[in-house]
Amino acid sequence: MNLLKIQLLLFFFFTTGFFSQSNSSGIIHYESEINSKKLKEYMTNKREKIKSKGLVKSLDKIFQNTNSIKSKLVFSDGKGLFKVEDKLSLGDKDLAQKVLKTASGGSNEYYYNTNLKSYLIKECGALGECFIYPNTFLEWKLTQETKIINGFDCYKGTRSNGKVIAWYAPSIPVSFGPKGEYGLPGLILELERGKIIFKATKIVLNPKEGIKIEKPKAGRRVSKEEYTQIIKKAKKSVFGN
Amino acid sequence: MRKLILSLVFVLATGSTLMNANSNDELFIHLTKVTEVLEQNNCSDCVADSRAGALAMAEDHGDRGAGGELMELYGNFYTACRAARC
């Protein structure tokens, strides 16, 4: 009898868990800016080593004088799409803002589909041609560190030897985040990656308006290996080996 | 050292231009060419600065997706540099 009760309880938890994830939808607004840790690193260590005064001037502006970039993650029924939503047309001389936008995801599209286990990146900014390629499997290390973000209890997860830090909310059972980050047992509400930090500023769960997630299209579909080779070749022509 | 060479180029080119010029128009054309050479040289700094700028802002190279971003950042720096200096 007890065994049957346990089985019923397990069945209830699994089914409700499954349906709550597959039926949930939401719009998460993020803002990204230069990570204060990286600013400190630049000011105390890296800045003095740069010889070109022009470059120091440009980097100073990027690190200290940029407005945050807005981006959005929409998800519904196990699918999601992350894009920078900054529509401002930036002039050639507006370098600082352009760099921040590129580092925040630029014109890229990050598509997630947990049902089909399909995770894609559409990238158009590097070589003047759009490529669609599979996102890499991301291996996370989970920790017990917690903090509250926008009223949600969040746990810390890291990857790439602690270079990427994510704070995710297990109470929102959606395994997506900004800039193609995925695979954690909860939605990422804060992400430190590279020089940038993403922070969720507005969380709208189950909005009234319907959400339609479209798979990236209009781009050359390549494998991850093909894309790596294309970029490697281009990088070699600019940066050498 | 580089500045010294550039200064010598400028002095020699301007000197020979002044000696060989037959009219004011010709002088102007020659001077324009000299200026163009110097400007091109200034523009060539854009390549080095853009490389350094992109590397300073890019993510760790070992990390995924950094390759395309590095190229895009290089493009950002290079376009801005050309617009400002050339």
Image (cartoon, grey):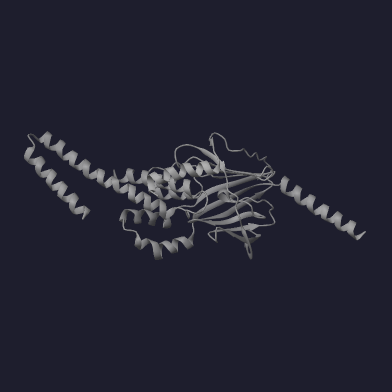
Quarter containing the N terminus of chain B: bottom left
Q: How many marks?
A: 0
Instruction: Identify the residue at horizontal 35%, vertical 61% (top origin).
Output: A49
B62 with respect to B49 (left or right):
right
Front residue (pair A91, A4) = A4
Q: Which quarter of the figure has residue A41?
A: bottom left
Residue A93 shows in the view: no
A141 with respect to A127 (left or right):
right
Instruction: Identify the residue at horizontal 65%, vertical 45% (top origin).
Output: A75
Front residue (pair A137, A177) = A137
Residue B78 at x, y percent in the picture:
36, 45
Vertical side of B16 occupied by A157: above or below: below
Vertical side of A240 occupied by A129: above or below: above
Quarter containing the C terminus of chain B: top left
Residue A62 at x, y percent in the picture:
41, 54
Front residue (pair B55, A64) = B55
Front residue (pair A111, A90) = A111
Residue B29 at x, y percent in the picture:
16, 36
Vertical side of A102 occupied by A190: above or below: below
Vertical side of B20 occupied by A55: above or below: below
